[in-house]
Image (cartoon, helix red, strand yellow):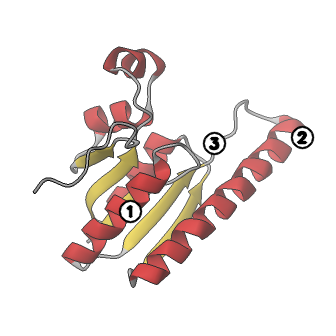
Amino acid sequence: MSVVLGYDESPGAERALAVALEVAAAFGEPLVLVHGAAAPGAAGEEYRAHREAVREAGRKALARAVAAADEAGVPSTVEVADEKPAQALLDAAERHGARVIIVGTWGDSPIRGALLGSTPHKLLHLSPVPVLCVPTGRHEQGPAH
């Protein structure tokens, strides 16, 4: 089994990474870091150049997450997929026998997520495994005592 994390450079990614590391360590599971890098459009030289730029940005973003996993003593695997984020996460979860998929949220309203098709919203409706949506932490409170 594994813990699959959707990681990009969104506001919720860092907090989701921290939670994913806690969950992976608690269950003794490896962390699978996934970045869906589907470029818009369908063909031509512009598409190939854009796709490679998006893939390279994904690899750089994931390098920081790998370093954090190493520091936490959590084994990790990286996948940069030529798919939209939700599909990349669903595919990785199936391949790696995920216990859970973890994603950060932007704090969007449920209506905005439904209309625009946010990754967390799609995963909640399509995933056969549990999905943990981690808020950005803008409204965090201190620990309960």
Q: Is residue 76 above or below residue 7?
A: below
Q: Is 14 in front, or is 27?
A: 14
Disc 2 from disc 3: Cα separation: 15 Å
Which residue is located at x 14 percent, y 53 percent? 144
Of the image marks 1 and 3, the number of the one nearer the N terminus = 1
Q: CA distance from mark 1 to mark 3?
A: 25 Å
Residue 23 visible somewhere in the drawing: yes
**Element type where label 1 sits in the image:** helix
Q: Residue furthest right?
A: 45
Residue 5 coordinates in the image, percent (x, y): 41, 57
Relative to residue 49, is residue 8 drawn left or right?
left
Which amino acid type is shown beneath numbered disc 1? Ala
Residues at marks 2 and 1 touching, judged by CB atoms closer than 8 Å: no
Q: Residue at x 49, y 73 (%)?
A: 68
Q: Nearer the viewer, mark 2 or mark 3?
A: 3
N-term mark: 2 or 1: 1
Q: Secondary structure at mark 3?
A: loop
Q: Residue at x 55, y 54 (%)?
A: 35
In-image side of 8 versus 118 (left or right): right
**Among numbered discs 2 and 3, the one appearing first in the sequence:** 3
Q: Secondary structure at mark 2?
A: helix
The label shown at residue 18 is 1
Amino acid type, residue under disc 3 in the picture: Ala
Q: Could you tell me if residue 75 is visible in this image?
A: no
Please give the residue where the numbered disc 2 appears in the rendered image: 45
Task: Identify the image quadrant of the N terminus.
Answer: bottom left
> What is the CA distance from the residue labelled 2 to the residue labelled 1?
38 Å
- Circle 1 crowding by C-alpha within 10 Å: few under 14, some 14–19, many from 20: some
Q: Residue at x 37, y 43 (%)?
A: 137
Say the numbered circle drawn on residue 38: 3
Q: Are marks 1 and 3 in contact (CB under 8 Å)?
A: no
